[in-house]
Amino acid sequence: MGFWKSLFSTSDTTTAPKSMEADGLASPGMVVENSRIFFSTDRDIDLYELEELCDAVGWSRRPLRKVKKAIQHSFLVVSMWEQRGAQRRLIGFSRATSDHAFNATIWDVVVHPDFQGKGLGKALMRHMIKKLRSEDISNITLFADPHVVDFYRGLGFMSDPEGIKGMFWYPD
Amino acid sequence: MGFWKSLFSTSDTTTAPKSMEADGLASPGMVVENSRIFFSTDRDIDLYELEELCDAVGWSRRPLRKVKKAIQHSFLVVSMWEQRGAQRRLIGFSRATSDHAFNATIWDVVVHPDFQGKGLGKALMRHMIKKLRSEDISNITLFADPHVVDFYRGLGFMSDPEGIKGMFWYPD
């Protein structure tokens, strides 16, 4: 628990489950409205809390059994939390599949609408990239909806580099 | 070994390692020049044989240690083999990463030049798709080089559906 205490400068961190490991504070600029923002790579996420987050951005609901399986079998899971005193709130999420060697693909990037426009999406993605690079993954990919292509471009992602096209299979 | 014998109608299948499971013959039309073509999902592939196949299509060499790791951590690996009498030859390969629930991404699709233009690439991809669908994966994706976009389109893949863009990360 020493790491927690040093991060939050408070003796009361009892609401943080023991299994939850803070993976790093967002950059100093990421202290939003007197709350602290931190990241975790712990997979032991409350699925109902995650569903609530995805509801907030209007995603279609998915069976929690499958969401659990997908989290278990992702190579990297990064969640973003707001901490106010002893209260924690899930405010962002992202995960990546990978072959653990060459390629990773990022899925399910979400930031709660209350926390959008504050640079937190960028911070979340930078954390993902840093983690993937530290695992020696050289090819980081994703499939971006049209309205977020510029967001990813700002982070160094290129669309269709050298004419490579993202493709999705549909039955004939 | 019963499965092997029934597939190849020969009593001599001793060159096939015991660990190799034939996963299915390609369609009847896939008997090419008196040899039988079959698929396997066995991951115990001779890495030097795979490297030779990738050399034949001009791919850059990759560290075998990493190739091994990538194969181990792929969700699905499909290899394609030519069988002539007791001789087996690796003539095609493909693999997919996945979260085991929603998404799969296909990588490293290769068919030996001697066997291209015979419908074997299509057969290999159809086998991949069938396997992924049987595992309840609904979203099958890939990143296609420009010269193979039409090939994948013919298999039911769509590029940039609803404006979704494939993106690759490059350092700033």
Image (tube, coloured by chain):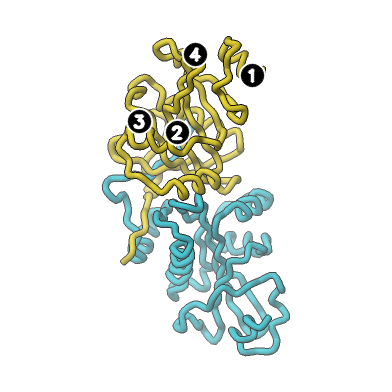
Chain colours: A yellow, B cyan
Location of residue A43 in the rendering, given as x and y in whole percent from the top left corner = 55, 37
The residue wearing badge 4 is A85
* Above or below, comparing residue B163 to residue B19 in the picture: above
Query: Residue at horizontal 57%, vertical 52%?
Result: B60
Quadrant placement of the N terminus of chain A: top right
- Kind of residue sitting beneath label 4: Gly
- Kind of residue sitting beneath label 3: Phe
Comparing marks 2 and 3, which lies closer to the viewer?
Answer: 2
- Which type of secondary structure does the marked residue at label 2 adopt? strand
Residue B134 or residue A100, whichever sits in front: B134
Mark 1 surroundings within 10 Å by alpha-carbon count, few (fewer than 14), some (14 through 19), many (20 or more): few
Give me the C-alpha separation between circle 4 and circle 1: 16 Å
The residue wearing badge 1 is A3
Give me the C-alpha separation between circle 1 and circle 3: 32 Å
Query: Residue at horizontal 33%, vertical 33%?
Result: A56
Residue B44 or residue A153, whichever sits in front: B44
The residue wearing badge 3 is A151
- Kind of residue sitting beneath label 1: Phe
Query: Same chain, marks 4 and 3?
Result: yes
Upstream in sequence: badge 4 or badge 3: 4
Mark 2 surroundings within 10 Å by alpha-carbon count, few (fewer than 14), some (14 through 19), many (20 or more): many
Count of numbered tags: 4
Pointer 1 and pointer 3: residues touching (CB < 8 Å)? no
Q: Is residue B172 visible?
A: no
Upstream in sequence: badge 2 or badge 1: 1
Query: Same chain, marks 4 and 1?
Result: yes
Specify whether B5 is left or right of B97.
Answer: right
